[in-house]
Amino acid sequence: MIPASFEYRRAGSVEEALGWLAEDPDSTKLLAGGHSLLPLMKLRLATPGVLVDVGRIPGLNYVRDDGDHVAIGALTRHRDLEVSDVARGHVPLLAHVAGQVGDPQVRHRGTIGGSLAHGDPASDLPAAVLALDGTMVVDGPRGRREVQAADFFRGFLETALAPDEMLTEVRVHKAPAGWGFQKFNRRAQDWAIVGVAAVVNGDARVALVNMGPTTLRARATEEALDAGANIADAAARAAEGLDPPSDLNGSAEYRRHLATVLVRRALEEATAARG
Amino acid sequence: MQVTVTVNGTTGSHDVETRMLLVHYLREVRGLTGTNVGCDTTSCGACTVLLNGESVKSCTMLAAQADGEEITTIEGMAAPDGTLHPIQEAFREHHGLQCGFCTPGMVMAIASFLKEHPDPTEAEVREGLEGNLCRCTGYHNIVQAALAVARAGELVS
């Protein structure tokens, strides 16, 4: 499978990338590791006229301790995040989840910025960032703005990013303990049929993979926990109000059941890790 | 567009289409057909090569993205005199291949994996090879070959 023809430009800086993006935002796409975009282009589901390769922009691959939070450059590869001492020490959930994405070859190319900007509800990292109540740092022609993870994932492959904007950094609060992650699939390297990222430091935040058109939080479970319910009772409400997809890997009904089981396991894991 | 890529130590410059995938560049432009195209969807790992020493799937990368970089393919593993690379030798010794289609990708994936995990457990080897499929289901001996290389401590990058 060969992508449709496109013009290729390699950006040397964020400013250069934004300048090219501004010329024709609707038919220009940013290319980082390419592990979400290139498969879509090979299937001709995406046919950008201009591809701006941001993969070599210097200074966007970092995992930095910024006091109360950890800042991650958008071009940080999954592998870099997986083995980062800062991530492992302060946000082990994120390091762990990065190590669960795809397979080693994918983790050598894919980037956190690319994964989040792609906005696939079946991806693991968006759920981790949502559970960590992360903040996206977005640069564009109107300057820099910050978007909460809760407001970032809008719909199927749709985020709060405007066509002329670029995600440049992700910030997450430190959460050295009190986290759990569950990913259920039937074949190695597959996307999760259902996945759960849970953080229970103070407020409980439970994010779901592949339980709807976008990355979602299990609000009913969170409210139950806040009201003092035990884990089993709270987890039983994990799929309340959600409309998960039916596909070859499982029906919506199966996913709803799976969500209750995996949320329970993730919460048990999170509370065990905290103790 | 013009790309300059060092493949197995030899640098070459070629005019390619921007949409040319790395695997097609290697096979058709550089004439290195040891790298196979299997699923063509980032799943099977048959097209695995090393990019600056790390395993990547060359069906999911543009030749343009390899511009200025170093690629190692299966052809670059054996010594110039034909002496097999220790991983290749372990595949021969442990019968790590049946039809052989997945083998180049398996060898390259193991080369990258052992650099990151010089003393792996069997479970780690199996997880480390999750991006490579063997449709003969010959995984057992592939894993044994990888473990034998690690135990011998003779990995040459």
Image (spheres, coloured by chain):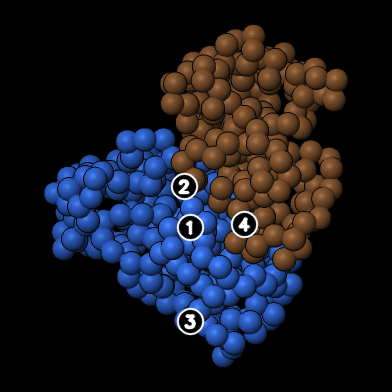
Chain colours: A blue, B brown
Task: Find the distance from the CA under tag 2 to the CA under tag 1.
Answer: 9 Å
- Label 1 neighbour load within 10 Å: few <14, some 14-19, many 20+: many
Q: In what quadrant of the picture does the C terminus of chain A appear?
A: top left
Q: How many numbered markers are drawn?
A: 4
Three-letter code for the amino acid on which mark 2 is drawn: Thr
- Label 3 neighbour load within 10 Å: few <14, some 14-19, many 20+: some
- Asked whether the residues under marks 1 and 3 belong to the same chain, the reply is yes
Compared with residue A147, is residue B124 higher up or lower down, i.e. above or below? above
| Label of residue A114 in the image | none
Task: Find the distance from the CA under tag 4 to the CA under tag 3.
Answer: 23 Å
- The answer to the question of whether label 4 and label 2 lie on touching residues, with beta carbons closer than 8 A, is no
A220 sits to left or right of A34: left
Q: Residue at x 43, y 58 (%)?
A: A43
- Label 4 neighbour load within 10 Å: few <14, some 14-19, many 20+: some
Task: Find the distance from the CA under tag 2 to the CA under tag 3.
Answer: 26 Å
Q: Which residue is mark 2?
A: B41
Q: Residue at x 42, y 77 (%)?
A: A160
Task: Find the distance from the CA under tag 4 to the CA under tag 1.
Answer: 11 Å
A115 sits to left or right of A56: left
Q: Which residue is mark 3?
A: A26
Q: Which residue is mark 4?
A: B20
Compared with residue B34, is residue A194 higher up or lower down, i.e. above or below? below
Q: Residue at x 41, y 73 (%)?
A: A159
Q: Is residue A72 visible?
A: no
